[in-house]
Image (cartoon, grey):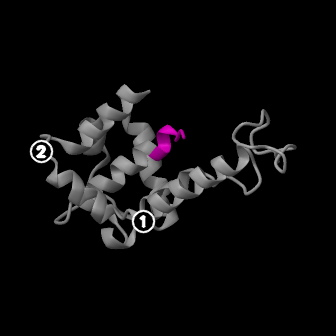
Amino acid sequence: MTITKSTRYALYAAAEMAMATDGLVTVSAVARRYGIPEAALAKVFQQLVRSGLAMGTRGIGGGYRLARPPSKITVLDVFHVFERPRTVGTCLLHDGPGDSCPQASACRLHWLFNEVDELVRCTYESVTLETLVRKARRSTAPDALLQLRRTARAAR
């Protein structure tokens, strides 16, 4: 499974907002922390505000915060802002992305990809930002979220 840069940036931003229990998060601070271009990240924050997941405050001392408690926002909520769910009946093996699989009834792999897709969706839906942040804080790595990013890059 792949995700877009915007989704990845949004997850970093959402995690940072969830960790900032006492204040606002700025675009420049998150961009510096993760090595993300500020312009791209600013667009991501704007989209998070439009979706109702975040709220922004303008001006000096401004920034962004979550619109709901981190325990009420799931990773899937963030995904849905930037990623379209795979349509039921589409096949990951078929050449035409988004097209229905012409071999769906006879394909021996179709059920597997549907099952994996459902497991991934359920996992993302079961992990709240609060859980994500709590696990990151417990990590022994000096900067758990940066470590997650390095691990993801190494896996590619």
Q: Is residue 105 left or right of residue 3?
A: right
Q: Nearer the viewer, residue 120 or 68?
A: 120
Instruction: Report the residue at 34% width, 65% height from top.
Output: 66
Secondary structure of the residue carrying tag 2 is: loop
From the viewer's perspective, is residue 129 above or below residue 103? below
Residue 139 seen from this side = yes
Q: Which mark is residue 69?
A: none
Write the residue at 70% across / 43% down.
109
Seen from the viewer's position, the closer of residues 101 and 150 is: 101
CA–CA distance in space, label 2 to label 1? 24 Å
Residue 140: mark in rendering: 2
Picture coordinates of residue 32, whole percent (x, y): 25, 36
Q: How many marks?
A: 2
**Any magenta on residue 14?**
no
Label 1 SS: helix
Q: Is residue 35 visible?
A: no
Magenta stretch holds residue 6? yes
Where 63 falls versus 67 (above or below)? above
Magenta highlight range = 1-7
Residue 57: image location, x then y, percent: 32, 63
Q: Mark 1: give few (<14), some (14-19) or many (20+) Cα within 10 Å.
A: some
* Residues at circles 2 and 1 in contact by the CB criterion of under 8 Å: no
- Considering only vertical position in the picture, is 31 above or below 47? above
Q: Is residue 14 left or right of residue 124?
A: left
Which of the 4 image quarters holds residue 38? top left
Quadrant assignment, res 39: top left
Local crowd size for mark 2, using a 10 Å CA cut-off: few (<14), some (14–19), many (≥20): few
* Label disc, if present, on residue 126 of the rendered structure: 1
**Does 37 sit above or below residue 84?**
above
